[in-house]
Amino acid sequence: MSSAPAPEALSAPLTVEFPFTRSLGPVQSAFLTGLRERVPLGVRASDGRVLVPPVEYDPVTAEEIGELVEVAPTGTVTTWAWNPAPRRDQPLSTPFAWVLVRLDGADTALLHALDAPGPEAVRTGMRVRIRWAAERGGAITDIACFEPDDGPDDGPEGRQDDGLDSSARAAEARPHDGRFADLVTGIVAPARLDYRYSPGRAQTRYLAALAEHKTVGERCPSCRKVYVPPRGACPTCGVATAEQVEVGPRGTVTTYCVVNIKAKNLDIEVPYVYAHIALDGADLALHARIGGIPYDQVRMGLRVEPVWAEGGRYPDHYRPADEPDADYDAYKELL
């Protein structure tokens, strides 16, 4: 198949979203539980500085630290940036300022949102206080945001112009034993990325061919290898590719894995097999699900063919073809 005029490149919105679950050590556990109880906590480092938010290991010596101290719910803005168009799930739905706030008694700054009427109302050195969320469960969102405090500004350099050195400021913090009822021991942080994705001209041609139940790769003009899916350039030679080559539809299982954990929102019963499949005529294996055969009968060298769902734009899965297994030497370079 020779090169053909490229269709207009595809583009579509894409969302990547997953919940990130992690357990908490004693320092982070106390910090988040303290937020739930409206008690801001920091940790004292080996040099006497109070770190807020707290960390479990000293940033200078890398030694484990755990001396908790309570700091004030008021503080000083050390720097800021205005956010005129809040995004989904940000702290405030109206324009606000991202601020670094050094709470009174701390030596480091905490990043959060400041509720202000406009950028003209925000300045370095301004005094602010925590606005606590009405419902709190042990997360950074227990701080709904910061809001302006009625106290006088601390000047352009914040509390550094009060004449106190680091150890003196840290001494303002009160020791805390970190004991709370019903400690928070783990958190689930939702991660989400919304963006617009364009696969480029090479993959647009590939996807357009799939919609016609054909698989098309591109041949490198230098090494003559055919890559599927195509990327528009040879990954080995680094030269542009344009010559289109139809491959498959059948192929060979080069290697595979058995999936035993059911993914959320995926209507496939476990266990099932995902495999690398070297389509006939291709020099790069692609991955796809294997169906139509018990999972424990899938094997390297198995010859397979695509199964298209009604109205599908790509193969739903691959099933065994009525052919003998391929010899290992025929696909060993594609493992």
Image (cartoon, grey):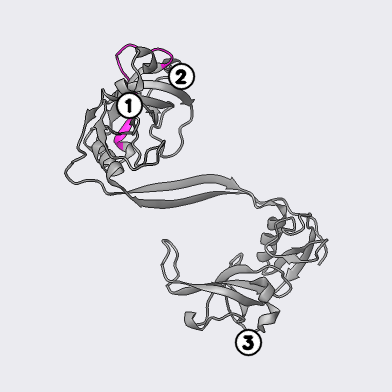
Q: Earlier in the sequence, mark 1 or mark 3?
A: 1
Which of the pair 245/210 is nearer the observer? 245
SS of the residue under disc 1 = loop
For mark 1, what is the residue?
106
For mark 3, what is the residue?
322
| Residue in the image at 59% along x and 80% along y | 300
Please identify the quadrant where the N terminus is shown.
bottom right
Spatial CA distance of label 1 from label 2 is 26 Å
Q: In the rendered structure, which amino acid carries the disc numbered 3? A: Asp
Where are the magenta residues, as a range?
Answer: 142-157
Q: x%, y% of residue 329?
A: 69, 81
For mark 2, what is the residue?
119
Asked whether disc 2 touches disc 3, contact meaning CB atoms under 8 Å apart, the reply is: no
Q: Is residue 75 above or below residue 162?
A: below
| Residue in the image at 23% along x and 33% along y | 38
Q: Is residue 82 above or below residue 163?
A: below
Q: In the rendered structure, which amino acid carries the disc numbered 1? A: Ala
Q: Earlier in the sequence, mark 2 or mark 3?
A: 2
SS of the residue under disc 2 = helix
Which of the pair 143/9 is nearer the observer? 143
Determine crowd level at label 2: few under 14, some 14-19, many 20+ residues with C-alpha closer than 10 A. Answer: some
Please identify the quadrant where the C terminus is shown.
bottom right
Q: x%, y% of residue 248?
A: 70, 74
- Is residue 135 in view? no
Determine crowd level at label 1: few under 14, some 14-19, many 20+ residues with C-alpha closer than 10 A. Answer: many
Determine crowd level at label 3: few under 14, some 14-19, many 20+ residues with C-alpha closer than 10 A. Answer: few
